[in-house]
Image (spheres, rainbow, N blue to C red):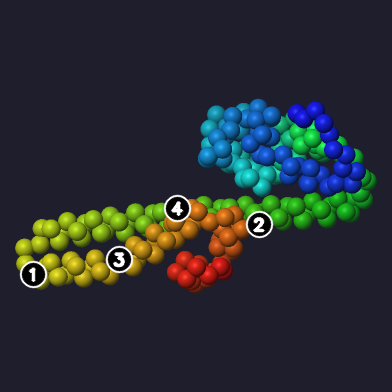
């Protein structure tokens, strides 16, 4: 924890939480983290599956075994079994700021919680769709490459001009398909989070146009 604090009198609790990187927070809470896979064993229910607990850089987390999930504040509350205020104070200490809670009405608190829940649901929906697209384009690219290899072997074994011409024709037709899936896989692996989110929410036609023309959906 940092020795010096910056006083932030009216700062929102979520702003404080956003100042603490997830990798650091998880380590402080006792998780064994893998920054590459963003997976870990869930300490909340004591599970042994090393990939059950997943998180994002934006602070969202979910355990696919016990079903719990939320943001940084709910994670601290669950891991340390403390109140909302205590969780924010813990995060503020990690962020090097001083937290001063302000009073809010029950109605405002309920509205804020509903907005947060909707935002979390939308974020996980986008994250799940990006994961599905990664698998889809990867599998499609591998299938096309295997088909190209098979046709190439048929071409090498071809004994007549007719069979060789037929094999070349199939390879010619397959080339743009392979190019498309390679471009799609390259994009979904290298795109920035904002572009990935827009891509996940776009229609199939918009995704294809983006991949082929480089036009953001």
Judged from the image, the secondary structure of the residue bearing numbered disc 3 is helix
Measured in 3D between alpha carbons, the distance from the residue under mark 3 to the one under mark 2, in whole angstroms, is 37 Å
Residue in the foreground of this view, choosing between 204 and 211:
211
Residue sitting at 15 percent across and 61 percent down? 155
Check the image and report above or below for 95 versus 146: above
Residue receiving disc 4: 135
Residue in the foreground of this view, choosing between 77 and 13:
13
Judged from the image, the secondary structure of the residue bearing numbered disc 4 is helix
Residue receiving disc 3: 175
Residue receiving disc 1: 161
Mark found first going from the N terminus, 4 or 2 = 2
Whether the residues at callouts 3 and 4 have beta carbons within 8 Å, the answer is no
Judged from the image, the secondary structure of the residue bearing numbered disc 1 is helix
Residue receiving disc 2: 122
Measured in 3D between alpha carbons, the distance from the residue under mark 4 to the one under mark 2, in whole angstroms, is 20 Å
Residue sitting at 61 percent across and 42 percent down? 55
Dot 1: within a 10 Å radius of its alpha carbon, few (fewer than 14), some, or many (20 or more) residues? Answer: few
Mark found first going from the N terminus, 3 or 2 = 2
């Amino acid at each position: 924890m940092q020795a010096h604090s910056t006083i932030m009198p009216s700062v929102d609790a979520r702003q404080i939480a956003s100042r603490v990187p997830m990798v650091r927070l998880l380590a402080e809470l006792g998780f064994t983290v893998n920054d590459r896979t963003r997976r870990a064993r869930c300490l909340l229910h004591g599970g042994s599956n090393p990939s059950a607990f997943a998180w994002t850089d934006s602070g969202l987390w979910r355990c696919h075994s016990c079903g719990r999930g939320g943001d940084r504040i709910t994670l601290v509350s669950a891991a340390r079994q403390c109140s909302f205020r205590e969780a924010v104070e813990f995060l503020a200490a990690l962020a090097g700021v001083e937290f001063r809670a302000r009073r809010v009405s029950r109605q405002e608190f309920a509205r804020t919680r509903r907005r947060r829940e909707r935002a979390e649901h939308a974020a996980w929906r986008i994250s799940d769709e990006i994961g599905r697209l990664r698998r889809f384009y990867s599998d499609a690219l591998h299938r096309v490459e295997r088909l190209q290899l098979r046709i190439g072997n048929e071409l090498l074994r071809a004994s007549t001009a007719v069979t060789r011409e037929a094999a070349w024709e199939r390879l010619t037709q397959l080339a743009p398909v392979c190019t498309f899936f390679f471009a799609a896989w390259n994009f979904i692996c290298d795109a920035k989070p904002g572009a990935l989110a827009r891509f996940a929410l776009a229609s199939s036609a918009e995704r294809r146009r983006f991949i082929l023309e480089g036009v953001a959906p």
